[in-house]
Amino acid sequence: MKRNKTPMILGIAVMMLLAAGCSAAKNESASSGAGSNVRNGTDAAGGAKELQKAHLVEGWYAKGEDGGYFAALQQNYYEDAGIDMTIQPGGPQVSGLQLVASGQADFGISYADDILRAREQGIPVVGLLAGFQYTPQVLIYHAEDKIGGFEDLQGRTVFIQPGVLYWEYIKYKYKLTDVKELNYNGQLVNFLKTEDALNQGYITNEPYALGEQGVKVNVLKIADSGYANYCDVLFTTEDYLQKHPDIVKAVVQASQKGWAYYLDNYKTVNPFIQTYNKDMAVEAMDYEAEQGKPFILNDETKANGIGYMTADRWNLIQNQLMEIGGLKAKQDVSKAFDTAFLETAK
């Protein structure tokens, strides 16, 4: 199952004090898997060229939701751009924000709301590319239940992890004062046993897993609630951005190219991703890719390029966080994201 979307930010600021001592000690055990740990590439004339190392840590285990980055690695888009890329899978004990803030990784993958909250804690991370224009998170419910919208959740049971920001927003917006909240422990057994219940999840994951067990469910898309979060946001630190703009540009544009390739060719990339996560079936990744397409490629990204972000959306998610107490003070949104390195649609 997927992680609680709101990571533990507490303690990252302390980790940043160790950055100078840690940046030289990148996690070598987190190699980029099958055949990507290249130190020399080939230039246009066929000669050898030195590649610049970069280290990207995922927000969770390797999966189709990060398919664009793996496609860029598999298809040598990073290498062609002069980058020797290492992708490190995440997990419950891996904080991408911590690793990037402390200099143990150069890039991470997170959410716009988490980036704003990190900046409030004094962690100067910057969003560079939004892989998903809206969150693929959902509330799943039993197919036989009659639920027309979020306002119908009054009096129902919701299995949810504490502190999930989109849930706090939904409760606030729809005035849900009579909902029984029970802790979601990563297992769906309690949801399956409880009538009139809902459970947090991802449209790319839980419906497929339950369908494989013969269980039919429907979903409420969190994006339909109005929560304006950008997801799968590639980020780095202000310091890294200032010191290595050439690497940032190369990584961002190679990642865009990877996403464009993955959308049409995910079935050739997912077996490669599986080398990083042998517990996940390729068929499940294929399902992720199909379900994720509308969140990656929409009218805005078709017109402006994959990964496109706007100040209006960042301001909107910030205002939503302020409404629910997710932020104590407004942040300078212009410093929270930077689209200067994105290649625009042609």
Image: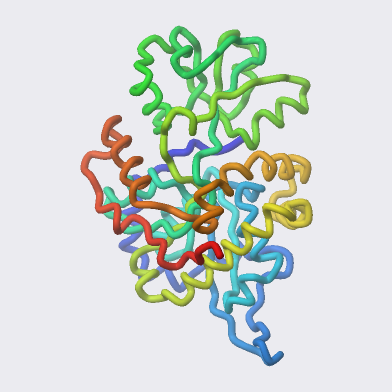
The quarter of the rendered structure image containing the N terminus is: top right
Marker count (numbered): 0
Residue at image coords 66%, 65%: 73
| Quarter occupied by residue 276 | bottom right
Front residue of 338 and 60: 338
The quarter of the rendered structure image containing the C terminus is: bottom right
Front residue of 260 and 57: 260
Residue at image coords 33%, 45%: 117
What x and y, as percent, mark residue 13? 31, 54
Q: Is residue 229 above or below residue 276?
A: above
Residue at image coords 41%, 66%: 340
| Quarter occupied by residue 219 | top right
What x and y, as percent, mark residue 69? 61, 59
Residue at image coords 65%, 83%: 40
What x and y, as percent, mark residue 184? 52, 25
Front residue of 256 and 109: 256
Structure colour scheme: rainbow
What x and y, as percent, mark residue 235? 44, 58
Q: Is residue 183 above or below residue 298?
A: above
Front residue of 74 and 89: 74
Q: Is residue 242 left or right of residue 215?
A: left
Q: Is residue 65 left or right of residue 160?
A: right
